[in-house]
Image (tube, helix red, strand yellow):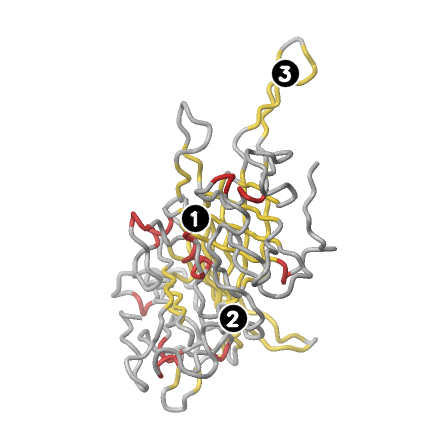
């Protein structure tokens, strides 16, 4: 079996880089916008679906039929102002029109997009200048290139989640699913033409499937944004960028970067005042009305293979609508959750659409200083509330409110949140 030329004793965070591009993006078209910044982890799972066929008269297996392989890629990044993984994986192809990061009402549109993912693994002793997977050398001004690449083509977004804890950075986690994974490495002579790989592993010059084919050398791809030791969050903590409107946008987003003054939380959370924007923020005292501890929102598209006669691979892998969206909000309580559960419903709702029920539809929108907007729309219903903590072992009592909606999961990345230094943009714009 062929082996790589890596001198690595291991793989660790500094020797890996990930690029995400629209499906069938040509290798020479990769550029810095395809680089995944702030990535914390990546995991790969491959399952070979086997179906056993037996026959009368024989104890041993008649045939072990292999179906379509399932490939799953999970990634997590900190929210830092750079493009979100969800957006990178669902931007779409140029010929179909890009789905902008600021576009509203595009959950269905994003669910139909596919992408290509490349994980590059580099020499650990070649310095800190690493370019994106699928691009040229891992070390500037040398011929040192990524030695190994994992290429995933035609991947679909399957699940997405966002989490803002009180004691760490805001994170985004995504799961991509597909049926095509290829390991590529540089152990063979770059000048050898034709598919010379062993065990299905192709030589390095074919890594990025460049238009030049086998004759294209290892550095044939266009370089993307380098990680040269000074990469930092796009959401800046100081300085200027384009204009004064994005000063101090928080860097990696943390608890202090939640802009409650332009966010909207459910009124069912004790302390929230009204249903309009800024309802969890006291504009007079400039402090939050609620002691929030965490916010998380997630969805799983539950994709299914759509098959047809005459083809082994699925012709589509559709999202299973209606898609449930969940949101959990935890807060320290000084009084209790004050959510009643009455047999005949809440009397306060008797003249509304929710007459005879205990919970109304509520709006959830969380906005961060770096421009990330988690908008779950106005049809969220409280599905459960729990009270706990504050026991004899110490700690504070907390209430966790869980909400659910269907098909409303709009994640946007705004380049700026203000129309001037004092005024935020209108709620329907953000």
Q: Quadrant of residue 342?
A: bottom left
Q: Residue at x 36, y 51 (%)?
A: 92
Q: How many angstroms separate mark 2 from mark 1 (CA)?
A: 31 Å
Left or right, residue 65 beside residue 85 = right
What label sits on residue 294 in the rendered view? 2
Q: Quadrant of the C terminus?
A: bottom left
For mark 3, what is the residue? Answer: 62
- Residue 174 location in percent, x, y? 50, 55
Q: How many angstroms separate mark 3 from mark 2 (CA)?
A: 54 Å
Q: Nearer the viewer, residue 21 or 218?
A: 218
Q: Secondary structure at mark 2?
A: strand
Q: Quadrant of residue 143?
A: bottom right
- In this view, the residue farthest toward the bottom is 285
Viewer-nearest of discs 2 and 1: 1
For mark 1, what is the residue? Answer: 115
- Residue 233 location in percent, x, y? 49, 72
Q: Nearer the viewer, residue 233 or 430?
A: 233
- Residue 215 location in percent, x, y? 51, 40
Q: Earlier in the sequence, mark 3 or mark 1?
A: 3
Left or right, residue 204 beside residue 360 = right
Q: Secondary structure at mark 3?
A: strand
Q: Nearer the viewer, residue 195 or 343?
A: 195
- In this view, the residue farthest toward the right is 9
Do callouts 3 and 1 mark residues in contact (Cβ within 8 Å)? no
Left or right, residue 143 beside residue 21 = right
- In this view, the residue farthest toward the front is 191
Q: Residue at x 43, y 68 (%)?
A: 340
Q: How many angstroms separate mark 3 from mark 1 (CA)?
A: 38 Å
């Amino acid at each position: 079996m062929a082996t790589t030329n890596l001198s690595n004793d291991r793989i660790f965070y500094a020797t890996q880089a990930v690029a995400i591009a629209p499906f069938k993006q040509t290798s020479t078209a990769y550029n810095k916008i395809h680089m995944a910044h702030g990535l914390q982890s990546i995991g790969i799972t491959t399952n070979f679906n086997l179906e056993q066929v037996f026959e009368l008269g024989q104890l041993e297996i008649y045939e072990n039929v292999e179906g379509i392989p399932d490939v799953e890629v999970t990634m997590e990044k900190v929210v830092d102002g750079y493009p979100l993984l969800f957006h990178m994986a669902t931007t779409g192809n140029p010929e179909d029109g890009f789905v902008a990061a600021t576009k509203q009402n595009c959950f269905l549109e994003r669910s139909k997009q596919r992408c290509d993912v490349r994980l590059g693994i580099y020499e650990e002793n070649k310095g800190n200048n690493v370019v994106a997977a699928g691009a040229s050398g891992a070390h500037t001004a040398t011929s040192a290139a990524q030695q190994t690449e994992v290429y995933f083509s035609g991947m679909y977004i399957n699940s997405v989640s966002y989490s803002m804890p009180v004691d760490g950075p805001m994170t985004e986690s995504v799961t991509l699913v597909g049926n095509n994974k290829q390991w590529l490495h540089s152990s063979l002579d770059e000048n050898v033409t034709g598919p010379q790989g062993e065990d299905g592993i192709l030589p390095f010059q074919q890594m990025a499937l460049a238009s030049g084919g086998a004759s294209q050398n290892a550095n044939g791809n266009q370089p993307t944004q380098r990680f040269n030791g000074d990469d930092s969050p796009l959401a800046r903590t100081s300085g200027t960028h384009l204009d004064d409107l994005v000063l101090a946008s928080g860097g990696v987003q943390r608890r202090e970067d939640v802009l409650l003054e332009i966010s909207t939380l459910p009124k069912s959370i004790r302390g929230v005042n009204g249903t309009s924007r800024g309802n969890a923020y006291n504009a007079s005292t400039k402090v939050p009305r609620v002691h929030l501890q965490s916010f998380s929102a997630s969805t799983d598209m539950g994709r299914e293979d759509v098959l047809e006669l005459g083809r082994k691979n699925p012709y589509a892998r559709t999202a299973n609508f209606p898609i449930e969206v969940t949101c959990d909000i935890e807060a320290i309580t000084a009084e209790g959750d004050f959510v009643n559960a009455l047999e005949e419903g809440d009397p306060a709702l008797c003249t509304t659409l929710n007459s005879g029920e205990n919970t109304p539809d509520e709006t959830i929108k969380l906005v961060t200083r770096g421009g990330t907007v988690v908008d779950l729309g106005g049809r969220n219903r409280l599905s459960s509330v729990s009270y706990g903590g504050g026991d004899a072992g110490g700690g504070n009592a907390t209430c966790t409110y869980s909400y659910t909606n269907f098909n409303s999961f709009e994640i946007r990345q705004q380049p700026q949140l203000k129309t001037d230094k004092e005024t935020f943009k209108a709620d329907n714009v953000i």
